[in-house]
Amino acid sequence: MDLNDDELLRYSRQIMLPQIGIQGQQKILKSKVLLFGAGGLGSPIAMYLVASGVGELTIVDPDTVDLTNLQRQILHGTKDVGKDKVISAKQTLVDINSQTNVQIFNEILTGERLEEQIKRSNVVVDATDNFQSRFAINAACVKAKTALITGAAIRFEGQVSVFDMQGSSACYQCLFPDVGSNQDELEESCAETGILGSVTGLIGSIQATEVIKLVTNIGQTLSNRLLLIDALSMEWHSVKIKKDPKCVTCSP
Ligand SMILES: [Zn+2]
């Protein structure tokens, strides 16, 4: 696939990076990314991926835009309050770059339909805000061996991890061996606890960066590492994630 003049210009600032180049850009243009969540994390993820030229972005989100979302969910504007998030998201994304094929699902995907979408994607990005969705997406990625990039943000804190699902890769469930019965206690929502909008932007931008690295196969990803960021003290550190041999999702 040769790049035309418009593409060479549009993507010139990333093509000039030696790690990406024309070949890397071609990989980005051919990539299929599946994104769960068009909220605080999903906004910068979707906007940066579409701007960088991903070939296909499928966005799954069942919610509608609420006035309280606008402080951080920059895909959506004041005029979008009350609209389906995926509709509002698509309008913003087409305006940024109409070359990307944006597919939308205004529902929660489960079972075979979830597995089918994950199987046809190169990379899956989890930008949801609840454990039930996270565990279901993780289990489907383990089954399909599709790389998963998870992110979460609350208050001034955030975390990102990557599971490539190859060989002895851990999975998201390995991080939470005991979650199940006390899911609700662990789950803190932005509605109850609060979140600084720019912190979701920070975490989502890291997730988008990891997508581009995975798709172009450059650098060292956060594979089997958990990056923890405290924006209040601006301390960043990462810890290794070990595969849990008793994991209910990924152990044989
Ligand atoms: Zn696991």
Image (cartoon, rainbow, N blue to C red):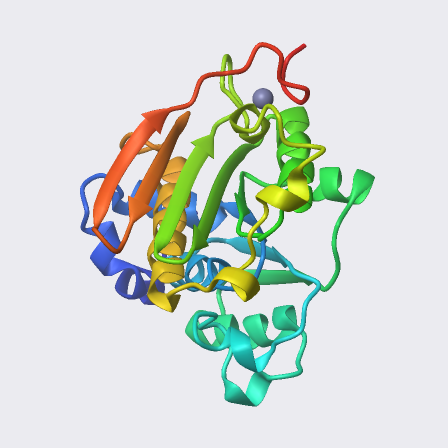
Residue at 63 percent across and 19 percent down: it is 250
Residue at 63 percent across and 68 percent down: it is 86
Quadrant of ligand 1 in image: top right
Q: Is residue 94 above or below residue 232?
A: below
> Residue 53: where, in percent of width, then height?
41, 57
Where's the C terminus, which quadrant? top right
Q: Is residue 175 above or below residue 99?
A: above
> Residue 117: where, in percent of width, then height?
69, 44
Q: Is residue 144 left or right of residue 156?
A: right
Residue placed most toward the observer, 29 or 49: 49
Residue placed most toward the observer, 110 or 116: 110
Q: Is residue 130 left or right of residue 48?
A: right
**Residue furthest bottom in the image:** 79
Task: Please tell me in which quadrant of the rendered image residue 177 appears.
Answer: top right
Residue placed most toward the observer, 125 or 116: 125
> Residue 56: where, in percent of width, then height?
55, 54
- Can residue 223 be seen at all in this image of the molecule? no
Q: How many marks?
A: 0
- Can residue 224 be seen at all in this image of the molecule? yes
Q: Is residue 197 left or right of residue 119?
A: left
Q: Is residue 214 left or right of residue 172?
A: left
> Residue 82: where, in percent of width, then height?
66, 83
Residue at 69 percent across and 43 percent down: it is 132
Residue at 48 percent across and 72 percent down: it is 75
